[in-house]
Amino acid sequence: MSSGISYSPSVNQPQYYVVQPQKKDAKPTIIQSGVGVASGVAAYKGSNFLARLCGFSIPHKKVMEIGKSLNQNQIKAFEDNTANVYLKSGLKDKGVEIFDAGKISFDEYWKLSKEKAVKFVEDGPFIRTFCKFFREKYGEKIYKDEIKKYWETVLCREYKTAYNTAIKGLNAFFSPFNNTIVYNKKSPMLISLPHEMGHAINFNNNGIMRKLHFLKMGGLFVPLLMLPTVLLKNKKQEGEQTTGIFDKITTFIKDNCGKLTFLTFLPKLIEEASASIRGTNLSKEFLSKENIKTLKKFYSWAWLTYLGSAVIASLGVTLASKVTDAMKEHYRNQNNKEIQKGQIA
């Protein structure tokens, strides 16, 4: 039963408050962050190695199996098709040359195509400005003896590596630098010639596919350029806001590293598919339906190797980010526990 009397504390009555110890958040030390970054790099390298071993090798193996399964009649048909497509496509008129790595040595190939490759590099927007600067500052003789010789050395090394894979019958390629197609007629890569001609058509037509031909190189470098941000950038804690444009950009890159990596591979996936479609369409006039079916099957498996590369790179970058964040979070929690123990003591 209520007495109707309410109680309110006296003004003079002392008030008591529970004072919580100030919460501190101990970020990982430099050494601990270094361990996290190293773990992320190991995860990136390891995932790429395992994925290529298990996934990428399967489509490539299928490609080689199809090439090796051709009978003599098919080989003759594809040899004739190469000559016919070369003439029909107009590539000869555009200066595209085809080299059989099984017959022509690298030294002979390089002697015939070196000047075009070097000129292509020298005429590039950035390199052209660089070359002009050196010519004006040091003279033509020093430029030729030092700078141009350097381009030739670098290009020679890169071309020799690619050419050796063609000699072994492991690859065929089109090079926009000197407008050449290289293959080994005696290898399973004979069947890939229409595809390589498709690349040459894309590049020499000066359309959107020519631009994609250059953009597809981004898939080789962009993931590596993103890795420092992915590994060194600390993951935002719950409720933590971005501050400034640089923080916003780096946070966006870190949070979307896998998607951004895959995006850089899209030009390659599109241009490779276009080259196969062009090569197949040009071959329809000269090959039987059965051989066209074989051609499509070969190119489909070959395209899957590029898709596999895109997926592998995307997963590798994402895993590197996750592992690095997990290690840094482990050390953060460990350091916070040490702080709490010190406060209780």
Image (cartoon, rainbow, N blue to C red):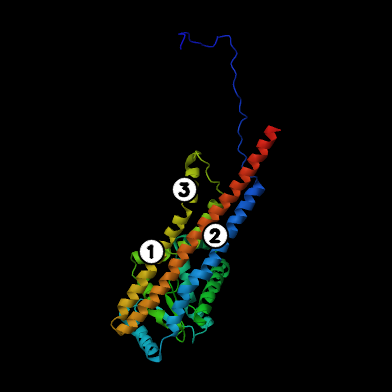
The amino acid on which the numbered mark 1 sits, given as a three-letter code, is Lys
Query: Disc 1 versus disc 2: distance between alpha carbons?
Result: 33 Å
Q: Is residue 95 visible?
A: no
Q: Marks 1 and 2: CB-CB under 8 Å?
A: no
Q: Residue at x 49, y 59 (%)?
A: 315
Q: Which residue is mark 1?
A: 211
Q: Secondary structure at mark 1?
A: helix
Q: Nearer the viewer, mark 1 or mark 2?
A: 1
Identify the disc placed on residue 252: 3
Q: Nearer the viewer, residue 189 or 52?
A: 52
Tag 3's secondary structure? helix
Q: Quadrant of residue 302?
A: bottom left
* Residue 283 seen in the figure: yes
Q: Residues within 10 Å of mark 3 (few under 14, many from 20)?
A: some
| Residue 146, percent from left and from top | 58, 67
Identify the image quadrant of the C terminus.
top right
